Amino acid sequence: MLVVVRKPPIEFSIKGTVPEKLIRNLVREYGPDNVSMEYDDMMNAMDMDWFKEESAKDTPGRTLRFYRKLAGMTQPELAAKLGTTKQIISNMENDKKPISRMMAHKLAEIFDVPAARFI
């Protein structure tokens, strides 16, 4: 983190891990308009271990369940729209049955998302 204080005739900066208490004191002393903070040590979330672990858990079935629930549909309701059974929907959501390309395209139309999300 980089904290910069600009208040004529004083200007200084602090680099590194800046304690919150120091930041609060600088803001109180010099005013919020004169203290700026830049976070140059931020990481891309996709590079973080927790994101990689969660992404590895993503499956077409979990994606299907997410969009079905987001739409407020039950498995029987979705099955009726697709002309199939609740059991097939359940099997796809639990990754017991793969989602075919044709089914992915039907799901994409229903949920208005790209078909690739279900493959």
Image (tube, grey):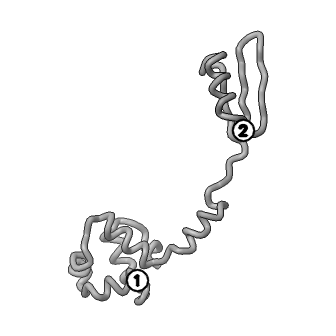
Tell me: 96 left or right of 36. left
Q: Quadrant of residue 69?
A: bottom left
Residue tagged by mark 1? 94
x and y percentages locating residue 29 in the rendered image: 65, 16
Three-letter amino acid code at the position of disc 2:
Met
Could you tell which of marks 2 and 1 lies nearer the N-terminus? 2
Query: Which residue is pictured at 65% across the width and 33% down the height?
Result: 20
Q: Quadrant of residue 67?
A: bottom left
Q: Nearer the viewer, residue 63 or 31?
A: 31
Query: Which residue is pictured at 25% across the width and 87% down the height?
Result: 85
Taking 37 as reference, is 55 above or below it?
below
x and y percentages locating residue 106 in the rendered image: 33, 77
What is the quadrant of the N terminus in the image? top right
Q: CA distance from mark 2 to mark 1?
A: 44 Å
Query: Which residue is pictured at 48% across the width and 77% down the height?
Result: 59
Taking 66 as reference, is 105 above or below it?
below
Q: Residues within 10 Å of mark 1 (few under 14, many from 20)?
A: some
Residue farthest to the top?
Answer: 9
Secondary structure at badge 2 equals loop
